[in-house]
Amino acid sequence: MANISVTFFSNCLNRNTSFKLFIPNDPRADMPPQENKYSKLPTRTLFLLHGYTGDADIWCDPIQCGEYNVAVIAPNGENGFWLDGLSTGHKYATLLGEELIDYVRKTFGLANSREDTCIMGLSMGGFGALHTALMFPDKFGKCAALSSALIHNEVAGMRKGSGNPVANYEYYRECFGEPSKLAESVNNPEYLVKRLKEKGGEFPEIYMACGTEDFLLNENRAFHAFLDKENVKHTYVESKGIHDMVFWSEYARKFIPEMFK
Amino acid sequence: MANISVTFFSNCLNRNTSFKLFIPNDPRADMPPQENKYSKLPTRTLFLLHGYTGDADIWCDPIQCGEYNVAVIAPNGENGFWLDGLSTGHKYATLLGEELIDYVRKTFGLANSREDTCIMGLSMGGFGALHTALMFPDKFGKCAALSSALIHNEVAGMRKGSGNPVANYEYYRECFGEPSKLAESVNNPEYLVKRLKEKGGEFPEIYMACGTEDFLLNENRAFHAFLDKENVKHTYVESKGIHDMVFWSEYARKFIPEMFK
Amino acid sequence: MANISVTFFSNCLNRNTSFKLFIPNDPRADMPPQENKYSKLPTRTLFLLHGYTGDADIWCDPIQCGEYNVAVIAPNGENGFWLDGLSTGHKYATLLGEELIDYVRKTFGLANSREDTCIMGLSMGGFGALHTALMFPDKFGKCAALSSALIHNEVAGMRKGSGNPVANYEYYRECFGEPSKLAESVNNPEYLVKRLKEKGGEFPEIYMACGTEDFLLNENRAFHAFLDKENVKHTYVESKGIHDMVFWSEYARKFIPEMFK
Amino acid sequence: MANISVTFFSNCLNRNTSFKLFIPNDPRADMPPQENKYSKLPTRTLFLLHGYTGDADIWCDPIQCGEYNVAVIAPNGENGFWLDGLSTGHKYATLLGEELIDYVRKTFGLANSREDTCIMGLSMGGFGALHTALMFPDKFGKCAALSSALIHNEVAGMRKGSGNPVANYEYYRECFGEPSKLAESVNNPEYLVKRLKEKGGEFPEIYMACGTEDFLLNENRAFHAFLDKENVKHTYVESKGIHDMVFWSEYARKFIPEMFK
């Protein structure tokens, strides 16, 4: 598995940004390459989004690339909630759904078809995976959202001077835009669901999981209920677990074969 | 010269950040170490701040570390103007003047005294060098500011919906705080000058340079005039040049021996 | 935990080399630092040696630095068997026992005392850990050798044109020196044991482990028997396992608390 | 210009190796891409070989990629003289001419045609550029050799126990093979020239330069004379200069437009 680090100038961020790329394309002469049902298919692509306070390096050995014949792309999104924020240079959603995907197509010949392009994330990255796939449904065929920080309704209720123990009001306003306008904003995944239904667009396959001891359990249940109400097909799973790497590893390994079957 | 890359968790940024460090401490057996007046002194430390759209990697071979016996620290400040912004996790000024300096003291035994600690930058980084040295004058004994983006007075006049061709209003508000309050803010280097005079604190040595064809020439002249008016001792130089690496290399090489003499 | 990558010019290798360094020195404001019996002691240092075909990057999250208050240094030794080879620039043993240890003392203030300096490795790195600790017993107080490639007696019997399925004769000759002289060579850990006994020097604490299904089991048993015969105190453990990361993780986590208790 | 770092498992080296890749494929929205005669042609590829004691990082800003629309690949060859040495895992020539070139074709779609694939190096890398292009003339259409360490005739005369101030006999034997057999070896560029003539193969375009104060001047003149004697077309230039980056930068900038015209 090759380990590639790419630094390029992003027009969305107005500066250099970097991402990690793992490609299963260097078989060792002393280890015969894995031959299975995946190795006969074209290489799929999986975008992997880190959480709040995290970065691309949290995924050391991402999900057995070789076994599933998948190229993994881990971008750095700082604490930008993977959204197009208010300030110039904070276009993290457009970075994912347009600039970066075009870049890996052009440079590596990857992620060329919707069906072979998936996006997965944890916590803030779980929010980002859902949001990005719903905002760019012609680019991403599948998304997996683990313990997702689906806090858009909480943020929509914030007012100047408020915030929460994680960050202040200005932080949420910068990431999500004016909270009072979030109900009808493309930064709101519920708004994106409705918009996609109205357009009659094709939804991505959606996989969600949350631990029953996770502090974000209610937010995940609420979004699950919302999708049910809107008749959007999706997989939702709960099992014992907290907001940690143990839970994410378990479900990463469960959802990957589902997505690539 | 050792080339060190450090990633650590910054509480100011609420995530991992990285900086480059160049230390002149690995003499090659096949090249006798340079012996000069600098090599007999303790290793000095120079913080090097990049400009808008730049990053720590712009300084490939920074300023002949070996010749001047200086350790160079190049942090990554994204496009944060090296200021404490409004949002949680945007404390770039405190990162420089407290968190990072403490970190290199603890980890590398560097930057222990004000006299041996300098800060230099270009464009946005020139602004940052002046601002940081004036905000933390007990930490930095010297600062050199090249073609500095001393745009605080322009920003102070911005109002919602405005901005300039470089970035929008929300960007400047995020970095500098409410423009209407910038006159009396610690994000304003003129305010810091007045505050330091009132406190009777010791000013850092200040070195400024700007090219006569630079689009920031007026801003540099204005700050130079302000320092004169406030009777703050400083070196100010203009010569033919634009806003580019040629000018910065020339003045980096002129100011370094001045600072470390 | 800071993640540091250092590139410096090694006189032993006659070129730049790099190592990874993990230091438990950046507590997060949002996570109180671990307080336990280790946190009250000075930071210990652990050198971690990779195996044949490996490199420093195999240790992603090395051994819970934070929990045991230990700085981990992972050098890159290519396929040099951590020995001083025949060619100019192949001094991997001296790199470890002199150049690198001096470097981390000077640059980071680490590994200053024998008691607080440990070395551990797997496979070729297990051989290297034993060899280095026995060659520089005043530098390393403890060594842990996992599934070690203790092939010195096999190599001693090789003759021109021979070799084994792993590598050719020239490779082993380059790493170990002339096989016919290996019995009395400092590249032979058995010779080092005898030499240290004759000098009356202090032995490092020695920890060895090997899986009962490992293809190197006989070599590990032979060295264990040799140490018994020479009355060198050591810990030797076997349990079910093969030559893989599962076994190494298990014993890394068992031996670390032993070494640092 | 994107800055890419690739680590992959090399079967030639029997371990991970890394290379740098610079691609001119990320135009900045705020800087219109350069439009010139090169930008209308397909992206060419230039392999850039470092010298003895060097590594891929010596080329910080390689040769104005953007201006000439060229992708630059800088591999790490340690001190292996870019040759297939005696030991298992020392196949640096095959790494360049087969494994790496296949890798960049497969992964990046680069270096697909002989005409668009060039190789350049300095000192040991100048030797490597000539040697590689002559050993794999169907892969490389052009080669530029700066201040080349064309020491094959000196090495051919070495005997056990000898060597030179740079390295010992064992080092040269490991890199070049048995010196007594070097006259008829594929590690000898003169032998490769004769072989290619006999086969009636097509020679690469050859560009050579050496400073008149360079300690390798005689070796460069000798190879120039050899090529003349063999009627191999080539460009050979001398001018005032020593064995340093000033000379290499000058001729890199002279030869690049020649090669890509």
Image: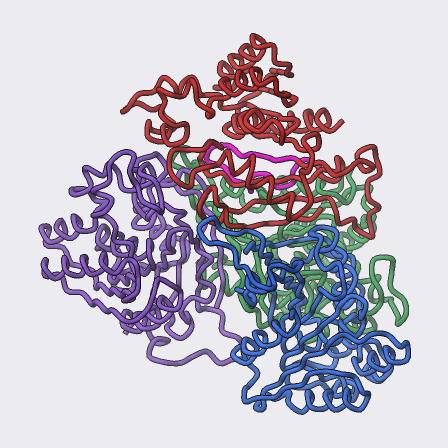
Chain colours: A blue, B green, C purple, D red
Query: Measured from the top left, where is residue D127 in percent x and y?
Result: 52, 25
Q: B166 above or below D223?
A: below
Looking at the picture, tell me which residue is in the foreground, A58 or B120: A58
Query: Measured from the top left, where is residue D230 in percent x and y?
Result: 57, 10
Q: Is C207 placed left or right of C103 in the picture?
A: left
Looking at the picture, tell me which residue is in the foreground, A130 or B164: A130
Query: Measured from the top left, where is residue C205 in percent x and y?
Result: 21, 64
Q: Is C206 placed left or right of B211 in the picture?
A: left
Residue at the spot 82% in from the left edge and 80% down from the top edge: A193
Q: Quadrant of residue B160?
A: bottom right
Looking at the picture, tell me which residue is in the foreground, B120 or D39: D39
Residue at the spot 21% in from the left edge and 51% down from the top edge: C189
Query: Measured from the top left, where is residue B116 in percent x and y?
Result: 51, 53
Q: Residue furthest top?
A: D229
Q: Quadrant of residue D137?
A: top right
Q: Quadrant of residue B18?
A: bottom right
Q: A72 above or below B51?
A: below
Q: Is B28 placed left or right of B73 in the picture?
A: left
Q: Is residue D62 magenta?
A: yes
- Residue C55, visible in the rendered structure: yes
Q: Quadrant of the C terminus of chain C?
A: bottom left
Segment colored magenta? D46-63
- Residue B62, visible in the rendered structure: no
Q: Is residue D200 magenta?
A: no
Residue at the spot 74% in from the left edge and 55% down from the top edge: A105
Q: A245 above or below A230?
A: above
